[in-house]
Amino acid sequence: MKTLFKCLLYLASGLYATVSPADQATLSNGDRISGILIEQTLDKVVIETPYAGKITIKRNEINRLSTDHRLRIQLQDGRWFDGLLKEDPSGHLIIETPNREPVTVNGLDTITAIGAVPSGKPMEYEWRGNITLAGEKQSGNTDTDKLNIHSRVVAEKKKHDRFTIEAMLAREHADNRLTKEQYRLNGKYDHFFRKNWFGFVGTAFEQDPFRDIDLRSVISAGSGYQFYDSDALRLSLEAGLSYTDTRFKVDQDDSYAGFNWGLNWEQSLLGERLKFFHRQHGNQGLDSIDNLIIKAQTGVRIPIAAGLSASAEYDLDWDRSPPDNTDSTDNTYLLGVDYNW
């Protein structure tokens, strides 16, 4: 039985080698890694192997690289070719293309990127998002119930454009008396105009009667830089100008032009067993240093199963010049359940 199993294993390995592309990277220490080349950037090469899945190798550790399936190869001078990366009999690195003479490449350092050949189909939006539910119910000497629902949805065409919508509802009752009521709705559009640089326009609406805010509206526009954009790590910074209009329930209404900034940081830790996130937005009025508002959300998610996660989150809402009879800082601590897609 063991002999039969070994034969089947060898047969499967042989079939894989026969039908699958055998791209190969030779490392500086002489080791060779064979598999399917997924991508190359200036600092890394990703190869999918039949024995260890996807392997990421530092670009400066590779001496030689060859491919057996057609890829898009981009050079430092801006040219790109769809073909195979090979070595000719004299040892020179070349790109073999179907309809032209081989193109000589002056070393791996002159290749800025290698990736899949575009299919020619229109790029489709990738959707991701989450909805978080946190609540508390207490009865007895004190009757309390709390509900916090927050959702964030992103539709993105990589390096092209991105839509983000966020909505939040928070309500609390104590002894049948409403003690907290907050509503927020944010929308943002990013357009990538040069590699990782993007321009954006955004709107934000907020209602919080317990902080005397009948309706606060913010319109913003500016530019940002996307440092990383993958499931393992997303990091971007942005800044621009804004216009804020606030209608208060009691205090005098206010409006002003301002400077705004934002940070979005999402990272997987401990091999996908922990998801960390931190988002921060600031808005400084140009007319007065007192018109400064900062909002931040920091938390972690622990995946449970099938898109479900347990979450812990801290939200900060700070206003340097709050309305009369209200505090400048709102601190919210949340334990809840997430559904992610």
Image (cartoon, rainbow, N blue to C red):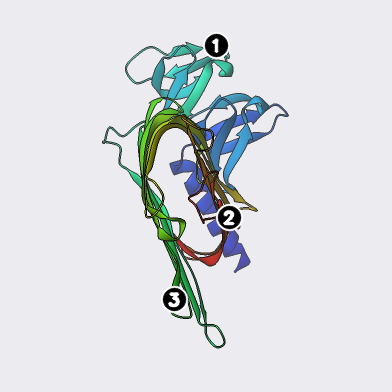
| Residue that label 3 marks | 177
Residue placed furthest toward the bottom: 140
In depth, the one of 330 and 113 nearer the eye is: 330
Disc 2 and disc 3: Cα gap in Å?
29 Å
| Mark in front: 1 vs 2 | 2
User: Are there few (<14), some (14-19), or many (20+) residues within 10 Å of tag 3?
Assistant: few
Q: Is residue 36 visible?
A: no
Q: Is residue 132 visible?
A: yes
Q: Which amino acid type corresponds to the residue marked 3 in the rendered image?
A: Arg
User: Are there few (<14), some (14-19), or many (20+) residues within 10 Å of tag 1?
Assistant: few
- Residue 202 is labelled as none
* Secondary structure found at label 2: strand
Residue 183: give x, y in percent of width and height: 39, 58
N-terminal-most mark, 1 or 3: 1
| Residue that label 1 marks | 106
In depth, the one of 213 and 155 nearer the eye is: 213
- Residue 299 is labelled as 2
In depth, the one of 142 and 19 nearer the eye is: 142
Disc 1 and disc 2: Cα gap in Å?
47 Å
316 to the left or right of 129 = right
In the depicted structure, whether residue 36 falls above or below residue 79: below
6 to the left or right of 149 = right
Q: Quadrant of the C terminus?
A: bottom left
Q: Which amino acid type corresponds to the residue marked 2 in the rendered image?
A: Gly
Disc 1 and disc 3: Cα gap in Å?
75 Å
In depth, the one of 196 and 254 nearer the eye is: 254
